[in-house]
Image (tube, grey):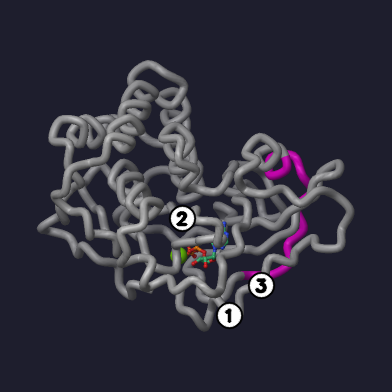
């Protein structure tokens, strides 16, 4: 997303002035409850989004917030992601993020909404004073974690505009509809650690995903959201990283940087 469309995107004011506690993204349990069961009111459409991406307020018994709602009905078919839905991939990415334990993806659920089933994700207001281009090129720890997360989910679209730093040191990422291909399609602006050793915290997070996919709840949940081959390919990507203990190199047969990178 370009800076100009970000300017035109709504500020995080959906629901502001409504009664209720505003749920921050780090309050995962409350956010999941709000997003799953709250009343969704569409406030606008995000301009320049490639699919129907709606900005909404959401309210539930004393809790309130803003969110993004992407109905399945608004998805454009993609030749390289013929199975499942983008909404399910977004939720699968959230489940992986939860298993890794770094809170890379804002709370995200799959639910029914005014335009049918889709994904609903808590809105994270980025700090407008943070230079996203500089952040994307930095050696920031949160960005490094995101690079590991992207390698696990095989993110084919990590643009600069998909980085959401609220200003407290954390960096959230959004737009994970084109993840989990069985082919290696990592396409990202975050290549600065390619071939470098994974940190010990990354190896621990990968270990949690490995365990979760092999016999834990993560494998069962991903199987509901992705094809069996995609879940298996995710397990193999994690296995490969645990074996070689390095950040992956760019693919040779696929553009390694999204265009436009913003
Ligand atoms: N959870 C979120 N919090 C804050 N901003 C978001 C969130 N999700 C999306 N956005 C903003 O909306 C833009 C469009 O959403 P995105 O998920 O990239 O849609 P699309 O799939 O159509 O590209 C993003 O680039 C980002 O600026
Ligand atoms: Mg996008």
Q: Is residue 43 magenta?
A: yes
Q: Is the CB atom of the residue marked by disc 3 within 8 angstroms of ligand 1's nearest atom? A: no
Q: Which residues are magenta?
A: 34-45
Structural distance between the alpha carbons of marks 3 and 2: 18 Å
Q: Nearer the viewer, residue 44 or 101?
A: 101
Q: Residues within 10 Å of mark 1 (few under 14, many from 20)?
A: few
Q: Residue at x 51, y 61 (%)?
A: 165
Please say if the residues under marks 2 and 1 sit with CB atoms less than 8 Å apart.
Answer: no
Disc 2 element: strand
Most extreme residue toward the top is 215
Give the residue at mark 3. Answer: 10
Q: Would residue 82 be visible to someone looking at this image? A: no
Q: Is residue 78 magenta?
A: no
Q: Would residue 160 be visible to someone looking at this image? A: yes
Give the residue at mark 1. Answer: 7
Q: Residues within 10 Å of mark 2 (few under 14, many from 20)?
A: many
Most extreme residue toward the right is 19
Q: Choose top left, top right, bottom left or bottom right for residue 41.
A: bottom right
Give the residue at mark 2. Answer: 173
Q: Does 86 sit above or below residue 4?
A: above
Q: Does 131 sit above or below residue 157?
A: below
Q: Does 50 sit above or below residue 88?
A: below
Sequence-earlier tag: 2 or 1? 1
Disc 3 element: loop
Q: Residues within 10 Å of mark 3 (few under 14, many from 20)?
A: some
Q: Choose top left, top right, bottom left or bottom right for residue 16.
A: bottom right
Q: Nearer the viewer, residue 92 or 87?
A: 92
Structural distance between the alpha carbons of marks 3 and 1: 8 Å
Q: On the picture, is 136 further left or further right than 105? A: left
């Amino acid at each position: 997303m370009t800076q100009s469309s970000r300017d035109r995107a709504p500020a995080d004011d959906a629901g502001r002035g409504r009664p209720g506690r505003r749920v921050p993204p780090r309050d995962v349990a409350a956010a999941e409850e709000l997003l799953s069961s709250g009343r969704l009111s569409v406030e606008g459409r995000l301009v320049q989004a490639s699919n129907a991406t709606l900005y909404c307020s959401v309210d539930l018994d004393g809790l309130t917030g803003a969110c993004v709602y992407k109905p399945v009905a608004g998805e454009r078919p993609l030749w390289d992601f013929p199975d499942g839905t983008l909404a399910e991939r977004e939720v699968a990415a959230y489940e992986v993020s939860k298993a890794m334990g770094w809170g890379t993806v804002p709370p995200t659920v799959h639910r029914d909404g005014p335009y049918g089933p889709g994904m609903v994700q808590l809105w994270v207001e980025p700090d407008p004073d943070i230079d996203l281009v500089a952040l994307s090129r930095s050696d920031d720890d949160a960005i490094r974690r995101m690079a590991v997360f992207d390698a696990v989910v095989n993110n084919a679209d990590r643009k600069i505009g998909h980085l959401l730093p609220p200003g407290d040191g954390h960096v959230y990422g959004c737009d994970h509809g084109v993840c989990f291909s069985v082919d290696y399609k990592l396409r990202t602006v975050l290549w600065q650690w390619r071939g470098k050793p994974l940190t010990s915290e990354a190896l621990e997070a990968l270990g949690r995903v490995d365990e979760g996919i092999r016999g834990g709840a993560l494998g069962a949940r991903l199987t509901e959201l992705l094809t069996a081959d995609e879940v298996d390919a995710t397990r193999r990507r994690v296995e490969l990283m645990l074996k070689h203990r390095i950040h992956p190199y760019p693919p040779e047969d696929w553009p390694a940087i999204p265009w436009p990178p913003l």
